Structure formats: C-alpha cells, structure tokens
C-alpha cells in the first residue's frame, strides 16, 4: 500500500513516509497472521480490525483535526494519568507506541540494554519518528512508577516535551496528599493549555464518557471470563480491544464495543464458543501487553488454552474502577472522587500491595479459571519481585501457576511454547481428575 | 510396537516399547533439516502400532503423521515414572535446557526451566570440556582428580568462557577448572530443584546424569541421593513411547 493521502500529514508530523509505510504494512500483515486466521470470530470485530489497519493513518488524521481546533493532545504510558480532564478540554489522551521490537535497537543508542522493552520501544519510536501518536502529542505525561521510566523521561525530554507526575509509593495519608496535588497540577496544566477554566459540567460529562468506556470494557471482561463452559471471544481479540481502548475516540469506541458485547451475549445464550470445551481457561497477570505484543496470547491460544482476562494495566487494572458521580455537585468534589478512583489502582510500584494479591485470588474464583500465567517483561523489577508473593498466595489456594518472563524478541517463542503447552497439559490433567 | 520420537535441537531420540511395555529398542540420530522426513525414513518398514512425538520438533511430526504430540515435560515425567514409580522430582540436564519437574501420583504438577542463556546447561559443559582439552564423555571422570575447588561465578556462558581463559592463564590445572565448572552447574541446578520438596525420590536424567562428577556434586549440594535413570538421554523418547503404549 502507498497511503498517499496521508503523506502530507506524515510529513507535517516529521514522519519519514517510507519508513512508516514499511512499518504499517508489517503491522497489518502481522495482524492478518495472528488475528484473521482465527475461526468463528464475532462479526463485530470488524470495527476493531479496521481500526488496527487505520492506526497510523485514519486515526492520526482525526487527531490532527482536534489539534487544528486547538484541543490538547496528551500522550501517556500509564493509567494514572487522569484522562477525564483531557477529554473535558475536548482533547485526546492516548497511549503511545511501545510494543514493538523494531524500535529497540535505535533506543539502545541512548538507553541501557538492560531496562524494560516497553520503555526502550517507546523511546525508539520517538527517535525514529515512527509513531503518529507520539509525533502528534503536544506533550507526553510520564510518571514515576519505576526507576527506568523516571530517568528515561529526562532523556526523552531532549526530543519531545515531557511532564512528570509523581506517583507515590505508598498509600498512606501523606502520600495521598501529594498525589492530590499532582492531580490538581495536572488539571491546571490542561486548563492552561486549553486557555480556559473547565466547567463542572464539562468535567462531569467527560467523566461520564470515560466511565461508560470502562463499563463497556468490564462488560467484555465478564463475557470473556464469567461463563465456565463458553468462551464467546478469543483472548487475542479481547486483548486487541483493550489495546485499542487506549487510542480510539472514547464515545465511538464505547458504542462499538457495546455492539460487540450484544453479539457476545447472543453467543453465550446460544452456547457458541470459539474454543473446544476442553480448552484450558487461563488468566494472565502482570505487566502490560502494549500493541503489537501479542506473543503470549498467540502461543497460548494455539496450544489448547484460552486467555479470559488480563490482570494488567492494558486490561482489568485500567477499567476495574469508575469515578463515582453520585451526589457530586462541584469541581472540587469531582476532583476528590477522581482521587479516590485513582487511589484504587493496585500497581506493583506501591509497597505494600496486598490488595492486589487478594484481588487476584477472588478474580480467579469468580471466573472459575483453570490456571494463571504470571507474565513479566524482562527487567520489570516491581512486578517480577511481587510475583513471589502472588505465587505463594495462589499455591496456598491450590491454583495452577506458571511464570513467564519475556521481552519483545521473537526468538524465545519456542521455549515459551514448550512451557505453556506443558502447563496446559497439567492444568487439563487436574481438570479431568476433578471431573 | 509403540514408538516415542523426541526431536531435540541437536539429536533426535527414538524409543520403542514392545507389547508388554518393555523397552525393546532405542536409537539416537542427528537432527538436521527436514527431520520429520528423516524420522519417517528411519521408521520405514518397522512394526508401528502408534507414535507419540515430543521435543522441539514435535509439531512437525504431528503435522507429518497425524500422531499425538506432548510436551517434553510430560514425556520426561512419564519416562522417569516408568522406571521409578514413586518419582516425586525429576532433574533433567539437557544440551539446551535444564528443567526440574515436580510429580504427584505419576502426574507432573509443576516445573521450572532455565532462562534462555546457556549457563547451567549441558552446552556449557561441552564448551568448557573443549576449551580445557577433554572429550565430553571423560570430562567428569577426569575432573574428579581436582584438589582445589575454583569458583566460576559468571552468569553467562560467554563470560564464563572468558573466565576460564583467565584461569588457564593463571596456570590453574585443567582438572581444577573443570571441577569448578561442574560445581557451578550443580549449583544452578540445585537452586532450581530446591524450589520443591526433595525428601522423596529424585531422579536425575539427561546427558548430565552420565557425568559422575556432576552427580556427586549435585548430590552433595542437595544433600540427597539421586536415582539415576537407566537411559538418561532417551528418557523423553521413552516417556513418549510409554504414552503411546498407555493410549493403545
């Protein structure tokens, strides 16, 4: 494909048309291989497939229109950044490209090799000017969830404006006072960029939009995991939708996702599953899967398993909680409710993080899953260290557990497949023994 | 006859069980390109009731013949239990990976494998043997003559090799350096194994089990007696054959 109608937009954003054309072609081809080869896919996936094909073209053009109207475009890497405020200002708050091995060699010119692939990939995309989202962003909001990230922002800031929100490491009162100030400052910054004070109505409206998006994602999550006999949609498709939830226009996304969920509800009532009945239903825990990191899902779902939930930031941690709006009448009250909502994020950057472990056990029981895969990106120390306590808690409950550590390179796929297949064999044997 | 085919990255192991479930023949051939064709050629004219495939090449065998394929973990667990019914842990040291498998009532319930690097695998033993001038088969026996235990601390086979070179330059004896290599592998294996309860039968398999010094050092580090498999390198193929036999 030549994507000629986007060349002037790409040029305006400083993107090399030849390089990005190859990148887009590659991403579309990979999507075809991984997604379009699945059988019995829901017909409403078509919207999300089409969105993927337009990821660096049509959607970037939409963002450009917002930009021309003077609306703020904010790029992020973390679910702590309060997107409600950006949406209230009529702008877009989105996740940046960070899931491809292709940009990592470039990043390693400036960053150490032994930090997490997500950060390196994101930094490389900036250096290569290969991501329309990064290139469009007025600024990037970084945060302090790990050592590698917070120091990378200083390097990234030499290429693109970066602001940093200080995420506390504990959830005690004084830490939450700090976090409250960070949210207030963020809101003030967005208002400054928008050139006006945001009204309570605008804030409330935006919060309703994002709450509705999260509710639709929770609806999908239930459909994926709450019916022990039926898996109406593959984990790969579920993951793709979660990934798209970070870049799509939220109102349209919510509408399309609810349409898909209507279709899935019909499937559930007709007992129409995309997998055989003896498929192992697995939950995945841990670090996020930034698109196009589909490696683990693809391996699991071509080895006799199905992934029914991602307990990760691109997944359940992002949509599990809403900002409560009942009885809220002023901006201050709304900001306080936002605070309460964001405080519930059980990121492994917190110490202690006991609530996450309890949540995982109860999520497992609710879904009557068959096993758990704890996924850690290489060098993500917080999630990796925390896995010990999670494993201990799961084993105490007799829950089958497999740990996988990986990066974005394709070469460990064979080894991961061996482990995953063996794990699925043991899970199935246990399932049979129980039955 | 019931055949198990374990297509590994370097060798393909083939085992057959007779109608009574006893091992009747075992073979080892090099793994090359189009190994599925080579295996079929090998099996041509043999008495075949069924085949089960395992190892990295299991999927290509499955596609070629429509036979069943199982993971190496299951094959190794099965193979060990065939000789030692009460196996509770299998420690396997192969050329490319090391694994520890936990078994309850004949069924594996958990396992660990080494990371992608070669340190702590049979490959590392092979690199060190070559560098120190030993044949792999005699490496363990020869190094039993060590009189000093040298610590090899490197985490990576490439760095460990340069560590060996600096030890050679320091005029340390080949036996002492070799013993250090054995000890570092035993220590990596025992760290993996200690995750599990080792108070019942622990079976050692893979090419590593043929090395007497490694067995000795692993036993001393784990403070247990290891059961040695009669066909250590063929355990995966025999386990696959046993599954073929049980399925018949």
Image (tube, coloured by chain):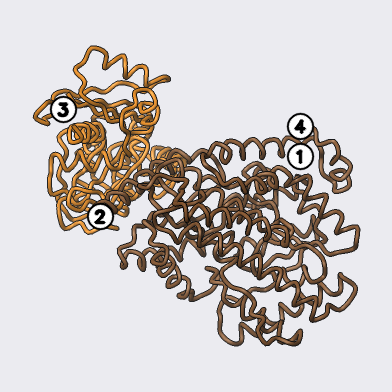
Chain colours: A brown, B orange
Name the residue: 74% across, 45% down.
A54
Callout in the foreground (4, 3):
4
Residue occupied by mark 4:
A1
Residue most extreme to the left: B20
- Above or below residue A372? Residue A15 is above
Query: Which residue occupies 68% across, 59% down?
Result: A255
Gap in Å between the C-alphas at discs 4 and 3? Answer: 56 Å
Are dots 2 and 3 on a single chain? no
Both marks 2 and 1 on one chain? yes
Identify the residue position indicated by label 1 in the image: A20
Q: CA distance from mark 2 to mark 3?
A: 31 Å
Rendered-image quadrant of the C terminus of chain B: top left
User: Which is more N-terminal, label 1 or label 2?
Assistant: 1
Q: Which residue is mark 2?
A: A435
Q: Dot 3, how many residues are within 10 Å of its Cα: few (below 14), some (14-19), or many (20+)?
A: many
| Label 3 sits on residue | B17
Look at discs 2 and 3 and give the one toward the viewer: 2
């Amino acid at each position: 494909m030549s994507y000629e109608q986007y060349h002037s937009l790409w040029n305006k954003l400083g993107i090399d048309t030849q390089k990005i054309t190859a990148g887009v072609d590659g991403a579309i081809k990979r999507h075809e291989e991984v997604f379009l080869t699945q059988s019995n896919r829901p017909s409403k996936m078509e919207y999300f497939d089409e969105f993927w094909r337009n990821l660096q073209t049509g959607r970037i053009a939409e963002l450009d229109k917002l930009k021309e109207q003077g609306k703020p475009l904010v790029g992020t890497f973390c679910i702590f950044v309060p997107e409600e405020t950006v949406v209230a200002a009529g702008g877009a708050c989105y996740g940046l490209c960070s899931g491809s091995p292709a940009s990592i060699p470039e990043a390693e010119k400036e960053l150490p090799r032994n930090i997490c692939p997500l950060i390196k990939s994101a930094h490389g995309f900036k250096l290569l000017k290969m991501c329309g989202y990064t290139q469009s962003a007025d600024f990037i909001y970084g945060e302090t969830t790990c050592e590698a990230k917070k120091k990378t922002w200083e390097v990234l800031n030499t290429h693109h404006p970066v602001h940093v929100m200080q995420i506390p490491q504990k959830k005690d009162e004084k830490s939450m006072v700090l976090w409250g100030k960070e949210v207030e400052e963020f809101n003030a910054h967005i208002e400054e960029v928008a050139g006006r004070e945001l009204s309570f109505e605008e804030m409330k409206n935006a919060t309703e939009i994002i709450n509705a998006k999260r509710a639709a994602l929770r609806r999908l999550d239930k459909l994926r995991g709450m019916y022990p006999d039926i898996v109406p949609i593959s984990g790969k498709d579920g993951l793709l939708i979660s990934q798209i939830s970070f870049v799509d226009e939220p109102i349209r996304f919510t509408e399309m996702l609810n349409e898909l969920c209507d279709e899935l509800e019909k499937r559930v009532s007709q007992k129409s599953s995309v997998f055989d009945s003896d498929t192992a239903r697995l939950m995945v825990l841990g670090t996020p899967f930034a698109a196009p990191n589909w490696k683990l899902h693809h391996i699991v779902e071509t080895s006799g398993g199905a992934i029914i939930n991602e307990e990760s930031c691109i997944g359940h941690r992002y949509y599990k909680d809403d900002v409560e709006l009942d009885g809220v009448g002023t901006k201050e009250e709304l900001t306080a409710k936002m605070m309460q909502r964001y405080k519930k994020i059980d990121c492994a950057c917190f110490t202690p993080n006991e609530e996450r472990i309890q949540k995982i056990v109860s999520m497992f029981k609710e879904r009557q899953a068959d096993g758990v895969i704890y996924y850690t990106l290489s060098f993500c120390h917080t999630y990796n260290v925390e896995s010990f306590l999670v494993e201990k808690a799961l084993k105490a409950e007799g829950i089958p557990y497999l740990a996988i550590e990986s990066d974005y390179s394709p070469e460990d796929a064979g080894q991961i497949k061996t482990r995953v297949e063996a794990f699925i064999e043991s899970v199935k044997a246990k399932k049979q023994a129980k039955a | 006859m019931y055949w198990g085919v374990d297509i590994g990255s370097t060798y393909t192991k083939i085992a057959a069980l007779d109608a009574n479930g006893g091992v009747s023949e075992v073979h080892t051939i090099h793994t090359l390109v189009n190994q599925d064709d080579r295996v079929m050629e090998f099996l041509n004219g043999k008495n075949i009731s069924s085949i089960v495939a395992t190892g990295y090449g299991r999927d290509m065998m499955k596609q070629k013949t429509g036979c069943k394929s199982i993971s190496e973990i299951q094959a190794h667990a099965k193979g060990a239990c065939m000789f030692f019914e009460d196996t509770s842990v299998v420690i396997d040291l192969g050329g490319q990976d090391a694994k520890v498998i936990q078994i309850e009532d004949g069924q594996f319930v958990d396992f660990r494998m080494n990371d992608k690097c070669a340190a702590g695998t049979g490959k590392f033993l092979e690199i060190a043997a070559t560098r120190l001038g030993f044949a792999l088969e005699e490496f363990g026996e020869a190094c039993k003559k060590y009189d000093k235990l040298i610590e090899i601390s490197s985490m990576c086979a490439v760095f460990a090799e340069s560590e060996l070179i600096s030890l050679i330059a320091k005029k340390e004896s080949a036996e002492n350096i070799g013993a250090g290599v054995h000890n570092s592998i035993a220590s990596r294996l025992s760290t993996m194994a200690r995750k599990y309860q080792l108070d019942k039968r622990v079976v050692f398999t893979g090419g590593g089990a043929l090395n007497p010094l490694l067995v000795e050092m692993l036993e001393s580090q784990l403070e247990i007696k290891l059961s040695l498999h009669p066909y250590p390198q063929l355990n995966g193929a025999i386990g696959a054959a046993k599954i073929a036999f049980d399925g018949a």
